Image (cartoon, grey):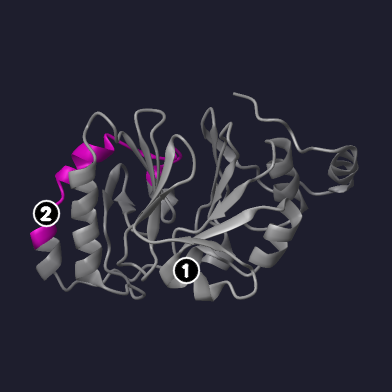
Amino acid sequence: MNPISNFTEKDSQRTEQIKSKPKSPRSIFPHLFAFPPNRDTLGGTSYLLIHEQGNILIDAPAWHEFNYLFCQQQGGVKYLFFTNRDGIGKQVKQIKTDLNCELIIQEQEAYLLPNLDPNTFAPEYSLNDTCTLLWTAGYSPGSACLYDSRNQGVLFSGRHLLPVKEQKITPLKLKKTFHWWRQLKNVKKLCDRFSAENLNYICPGSNTGYLRGKGYVDNAYQKLQALDLEELKISQKLFLLN
C-alpha cells in the first residue's frame, strides 16, 4: 500500500538544507509511525497512520522541518485528528498550513481551535473504510480514540488509557482529569464494543516509555477486560503524571 507521494523537488532541496537531523519517527507496523514525545503536548506521542484513502496524523508532533519532510515523504497528511485538548500543541496553525490537512476534533473541544475551521463529530465518526473516531470523554470533555480495524484491530487511546508498566494499560486519575467516573464508563463501553477478535493492540498517546521500545500494548482486549472498574471507581488515588 503505497499512497501517492506529495514529496516535491522543492521538498528535496529543503531536505539537503537540514544540518542536524532530529530523531526519526519509529516504525511500529508497516503502515504506522510513532514520533518522539513532544514537549508542547506534555510529552505526548503522535502517530502517522498510513492509509490509501488519506494519511492520518494523530495528535500534533513537534513541528520542524524534519517532521514536515517526513510526512511529505510518506504521502502527505489528509487529516490531523486530536485525541484530547492536550494533544493540540502550540503549532497547530502552522501544521495545518504546511500540510494542507483537515483538522478533526470532538465537538466539545472545537472552541480550542478558533479560526481554524475544524471538522467535528459527536458520538463517533468514520474517517474511511477502516478507521472510526470514538468519543470517550473523561480525561477531557472531548477525549476521543481512533480505532483502525487493520492488524486485528488497533486502538489509539490518547490519554484515555495509558500504560503504567510494561504491557499493562489502565485509565488513570490524573491532575487534569475532567470527569473520572465518566472516563471509567467509557472504558466499559470499549469493552462492550470490541472483542478479542477485533482489538489486539493499543497505542497510547503518552507514557510510552513504559512500553520499553515495543510501541504498543498487545492482547489489548484481554487486558481491558481484566481491569476492575469498580475498584478504580472507588479509588481516590491521584497519579501525579502529565
From which residue to which does the magenta span run? 211-230
111 with respect to 148 (left or right): right
Q: Amino acid at mark 1?
A: Arg
82 with respect to 9 (left or right): left
Q: Which residue is mark 1?
A: 85
Q: Which residue is mark 2?
A: 228
**Could you tell me how far apart the alpha carbons at marks 2 and 1 are, in whole angstroms?**
27 Å
Q: Position of residue 129 (x, y in %)?
A: 46, 35
Mark count: 2
At x 56%, y 45%, the residue is 56
**Contact between labelled residues 1 and 2, with CB atoms less than 8 Å apart:** no
Query: Is residue 222 visible from the viewing direction of this image?
Result: yes
Q: In which quadrant of the rendered image does the N terminus lie?
A: top right
Query: Is residue 224 visible from the viewing direction of this image?
Result: no
Q: Amino acid at mark 2?
A: Asp
The foreground one among 242 and 186 is 186
Vertical placement of 235 versus 8: above or below? below
First in sequence, mark 2 or 1: give its number: 1
At x 90%, y 43%, the residue is 10
Q: Position of residue 82 (x, y in %)?
A: 50, 59
Q: Is residue 218 magenta?
A: yes
Q: Circle 2 sits in a helix, a strand or a loop, which is it?
A: loop
The foreground one among 138 and 52 is 52
**Number of the front mark, 2 or 1:** 1
Packing grade of label 1 (10 A; few <14, some 14-19, many >=20) is many
Q: In which quadrant of the rendered image does the C terminus lie?
A: bottom left
63 with respect to 226 (left or right): right
Q: Quadrant of residue 193?
A: top left
Q: Circle 1 sits in a helix, a strand or a loop, which is it?
A: helix
At x 73%, y 36%, the residue is 73
